[in-house]
């Protein structure tokens, strides 16, 4: 009988998890890194609401932080699932992705949803990475 390996929970100090949370932000399962949907949480209450482009950059930064805390880097991210509240924002998401990643880009799904957990959020991203796979030969 095969013995199951234990998932490792990854916590980054700059991305706190609430004590009342019923989810983990990031789990490492063998070489696989799975992350819950990340948002530009409005609890920081900026003076002006962030644009979808700005929210996407904040989220991608959180994803990078968690992947690095798990022992990897941006080059290990192979799949994103992106939820937007307005499909017209796809170009803003694409612009942020192009600034954040280098070719070859991670696989991606982008879908429009009715709403996200807090008003003012316009984008949420699930990310998947593998510690034993890199998208760039120069990494």
Image: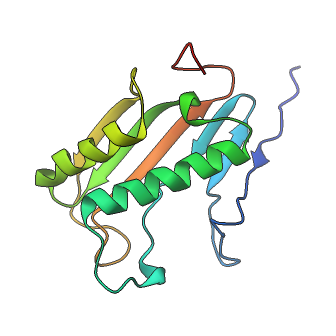
Which quarter of the rendering shows the N terminus?
A: top right
Question: Which residue is rendered at x = 74% and y = 38% of the image?
Answer: 71
Question: Which residue is rendered at x = 41% and y = 85% of the image?
Answer: 45
How far across and how far down the image is residue 17, in percent?
66, 69
Residue 39 in the figure: left or right of residue 22:
left
Front-most of residues 78 and 68: 68
Colour scheme in use: rainbow
How far across and how far down the image is residue 43, in percent?
47, 82
Which quarter of the rendering shows the C terminus?
A: top right
**Residue ranking furthest to the top:** 137
Asked if one can make out residue 30 in the rendered structure from this viewpoint, the answer is: yes
Please tell me in which quadrant of the rendered image residue 68 appears.
top right
Residue 93 in the figure: left or right of residue 33:
left
Please tell me in which quadrant of the rendered image residue 13 appears.
bottom right
Question: Which residue is rendered at x = 83% and y = 40% of the image?
Answer: 6
The vertical placement of 41 against 136, above or below, is: below
How far across and how far down the image is residue 49, in percent?
28, 78
Front-most of residues 58 and 1: 58
**Residue ranking furthest to the left:** 88
The number of callouts visible is 0
Asked if one can make out residue 36 in the rendered structure from this viewpoint, the answer is: no
Front-most of residues 99 and 9: 99
How far across and how far down the image is residue 101, in percent?
42, 35
The vertical placement of 104 against 5, above or below, is: above
Question: Which residue is rendered at x = 58% and y = 29% of the image?
Answer: 76
The vertical placement of 131 against 119, above or below, is: above
The vertical placement of 101 against 136, above or below, is: below
């Amino acid at each position: 009988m095969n013995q199951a390996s234990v998932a490792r929970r990854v916590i980054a100090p700059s991305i706190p998890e609430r004590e009342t949370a019923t989810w983990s932000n990031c789990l490492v399962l063998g070489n696989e890194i799975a992350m819950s949907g990340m948002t530009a949480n409005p609890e920081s209450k900026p003076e002006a609401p962030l644009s979808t482009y700005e929210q996407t950059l904040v989220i991608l930064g959180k994803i990078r932080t968690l992947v690095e805390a798990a022992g990897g880097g941006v080059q290990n991210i192979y799949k994103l699932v992106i939820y937007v509240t307005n499909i017209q924002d796809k170009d803003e998401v694409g612009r942020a992705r192009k600034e954040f990643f280098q070719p070859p880009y991670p696989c991606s799904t982008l879908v429009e949803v009715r709403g996200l957990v807090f008003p003012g959020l316009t984008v949420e991203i699930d990310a998947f990475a593998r510690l034993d796979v890199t998208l760039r030969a120069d990494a």
